[in-house]
Image (cartoon, rainbow, N blue to C red):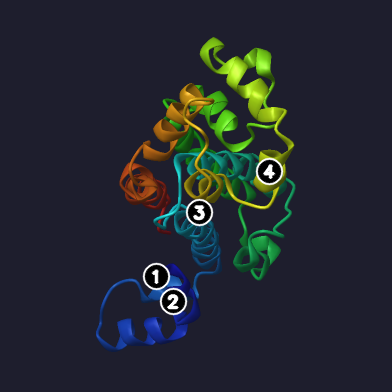
Amino acid sequence: MLSRVCDLQQEIATFLRQKNLPGADHFSNPQWLARLALLTDITTHLNDLNVKLQGKNILSTDMYSHITAFEVKLRLWEAQLAAGQFMHFPRIAACAPDDVDLNTCVGVVTSLREEFAPRFTGVRPLAPGFKLFTSPFDFPVDEAPAPLQMELVELQCNDELKAKYRTASPLSFFRDLVLPFNKFPNYIEHVKRIVAMFGSTYCCEQLFFKNEIYKVLHSLPAK
């Protein structure tokens, strides 16, 4: 939506003036347009994340990976924007430097990061279990739960399974290759719990996107 507003700003301004509607003057205000560019770039990044979290084959482990990566990106963007570097914000980069308020740019990303992090605090303790699912052949045996340790040793020493795992995603590996339950009962139960977790990661939109980004948007001054 914001991308279309940026692309059609002259047409929108003309329409507002013809209809005697408020807001047309904003489109001749370079500082306001710079803030619009900032928010457009931010929402583009959020939309990209939202797309990654959708799909019937997206697991909780995938969600955690994408969320963790996005948090790292937010910290990177904070530092880069503070230094006046806009390589990941193309619409801001197209604005005149004097029209861009770096404090506003950093403040928006900081607010987003601070609102974002608490939404997933309940997921972070699950990280070791996720890693045990996604990287069973590299997971330190002594860090695994005791009931899984002997099974993990057997799994990691099985060269045939290890070779097959290298050419498949975790989901397809466990879906298409049924491990002998009598050899890996505890690990198979762990896999089942991870696969069934959360049902659908699409709920992330309800958790975050529709609430927090608009809170940040509406906190900015219109002038």
User: What's under tag 4, amino acid-wise?
Assistant: Leu
Could you tell me residue 131's position as x and y percent? 59, 31
Is any atom of residue 81 visible in this view?
Answer: yes
Q: Is residue 130 left or right of residue 53?
A: right
Residue 146 sits in which quadrant? Answer: top right
Name the disc covering residue 131, or none. Answer: none
What whole-number distance in Å separates the C-alpha atoms at marks 2 and 4?
Answer: 27 Å
Relative height, residue 97 to residue 191 (above, below): below
User: What's under tag 2, amino acid-wise?
Assistant: Arg
Name the disc covering residue 76, or none. Answer: 4
Mark closer to the observer (1, 3)? 3
Quarter holding the N terminus? bottom left
User: What's under tag 3, amino acid-wise?
Assistant: Leu
User: What's under tag 1, amino acid-wise?
Assistant: Met
Mark closer to the observer (4, 3)? 3
Residue 145 sits in which quadrant? Answer: top right
**Label 3 residue SS:** helix
Mark closer to the observer (3, 2)? 3
192, 43: nearer the viewer: 192
Check disc 3 and report the residue beneath it.
49
Mark 1 surroundings: few (<14), some (14-19) or many (≥20) residues within 10 A:
few
Is any atom of residue 119 visible in this view?
Answer: no
What whole-number distance in Å separates the C-alpha atoms at marks 1 and 3?
Answer: 16 Å
**CB of mark 1 within 8 Å of CB of mark 2?**
yes
Relative height, residue 25 to residue 83 (above, below): below
Mark 4 or mark 3: whose residue is earlier in sequence: 3
Q: Residue at x 74, y 47 (%)?
A: 83
Could you tell me residue 140's position as x and y percent? 69, 20
Q: Residue at x 45, y 45 (%)?
A: 59
Could you tell me residue 27's position as x and y percent? 45, 74
